Image (cartoon, helix red, strand yellow):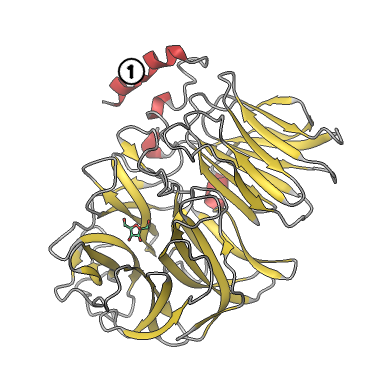
Amino acid sequence: MRKAILSILALGAAMISCSPSELNDVEQEKFRPKFHFSPEANWMNDPNGMVYYEGEYHLFFQYYPDSTVWGPMHWGHAVSKDLVDWEEMGIALYPDELGYIFSGSAVADHQNTAGFKSGEHTPLVAIFTHHHDENGEVQSLAFSNDRGRTWEKYENNPVLPNPGIQDFRDPKVMWHEEGGQWIMSLAAKDVIHFYSSPNLKDWTFESEFGKGIGAKGGVWECPDLFEIKGEDGRSKWVLFVSINPGAPNGGSGTQYFTGEFDGKTFAADHQDEKWLDWGTDNYAGVTWANVPKEDGRTLFMGWMNNWLYGDRTPTEGWRGAMTLARELVLVRDQGDDYIAQKPVREFYQKLKPSIESKQVNFNEALAIGSESGFVVKLSGFQESKGDIKIKLFNENGEELLLNLTADKISLDRSSSGETGFHPEFGKIQEMPYRGNNLVDVELVVDASSIEVFINDGLYAMTAQVFNKCPFDKMMVERPDAPGKYSASVYEVPAMSSRK
Ligand code: FRU
């Protein structure tokens, strides 16, 4: 099947000026990511139920197995030992009489608080929304006693009925060590509700967060409350709240608040939202549960898409990919707390250098190879008063432009390839820059995406890009003060399932 698709794609390549062998991911289907998770077939949205157990990271996801557009939701499932190489498993949860299986979380119930344990393994418990068009949204449980391989729904679902709020969903559950109980964050229209439980089955309302706080341009979805350590040893509580629409560059995005959580109430340090990622394509992301203490990292993944145009992207046979797994850290910058993010170290360990710390002239093109996936690390920018523009381009006339100024960073994908499937896809994306000294810029480019990390991930932008030919050249422009910068380029091996 794949071979047949390949030859059709190779024929189509005759119209385009890169050779068929270079055609963007011709060996991997059109626009198919090489090293980002995408479902083998059909529609995927939010990451769900991310939990670590016995050497495996689980990724469940909103999945519709019958079409490449959204439909009755299931939970798909993938497993990885290293957060990079994902293996897709069978469907974990199917819709039932209570409704579709919407977003939610999973935990390893080591103390068997819910009483689901029936064998040698710790039960994994999924807490998810049942969505029913007439009966509304309620929260339910399912459990697995075989390391997530098979799932059974709890017989007394739902565990949290609907209190008369139409949008009432996406439970994210964490074990609150100090309080010795489970805490659930739940999106309730445009605020967050917190509930507590000793056993995952009986839930008590604790508090509400968000009246008059944060971005309100759409419905609040997919919250995540977690504690995170700062570089300086401090620890803070963070609340992620995805919102759709209402993101700064259109459609969906994830805002966050830093503050304190006392087991009942979350008190934010600030009223205005901060944005996790200013690109258009990082939504509904949350953190992994049960990451071992000796590891201690805060691990995150988001849906690399946007509800604005998510069902029109020009992929075939499948639609939707995840961001790379990222490590989040708390960083103090100019008197304020921010979440910085970078791909997990396991990803960097797989990279193969093709250009190492090369001194390159500004305003001169650098050949970066014709691989459809690569990482570029740029540094050694001397102080500059003027703009720096980083351009990825190819012979096919496709280009992607990152423009850095003292107070703004923008990403222009208007000439990057296929953009016409939605009027707003080609719009320039902007992110405020707080005038920091520019230390490094990292670009992670796969067959249909770019992830931009600036100053060790203090600034992040993630965007889909549908270039027909690989970007095989780069130019860093700085007209005001020519000189040299340092560039390293790395090849990224394809995930085993994409080889
Ligand atoms: C977020 C979301 C969730 C919901 C799910 C449905 O992208 O809208 O709020 O549970 O997707 O697929």
Q: Could you tell me if residue 231 is visible in this image?
A: no
Q: Could you tell me if residue 411 is visible in this image?
A: yes
The residue drawn where x is 77% and y is 55% is 435
Residue 312 placement (x, y as % from top left): 37, 38
Q: Is residue 336 left or right of residue 480?
A: left
| Quadrant of residue 8 within the rendered picture | top left
30 up-or-down from 137: above or below:
above
The one of 441 and 110 positioned closer to us in this rendering: 441
Instruction: State how many labels appear.
Output: 1
61 up-or-down from 413: above or below:
below
Residue 138 placement (x, y as % from top left): 25, 71
- Residue, disc 1: 8
Residue 254 placement (x, y as % from top left): 50, 59
The residue drawn where x is 47% and y is 86% is 178
| Mark 1 C-beta to ligand 1 under 8 Å | no
392 up-or-down from 216: above or below:
above
Inspect the image, locate mark 1, and give the three-letter code of the amino acid beneath it: Ile
Tell me the quarter of the image containing the C terminus.
Answer: top left
The one of 268 and 444 positioned closer to us in this rendering: 268
Residue 297 placement (x, y as % from top left): 54, 64
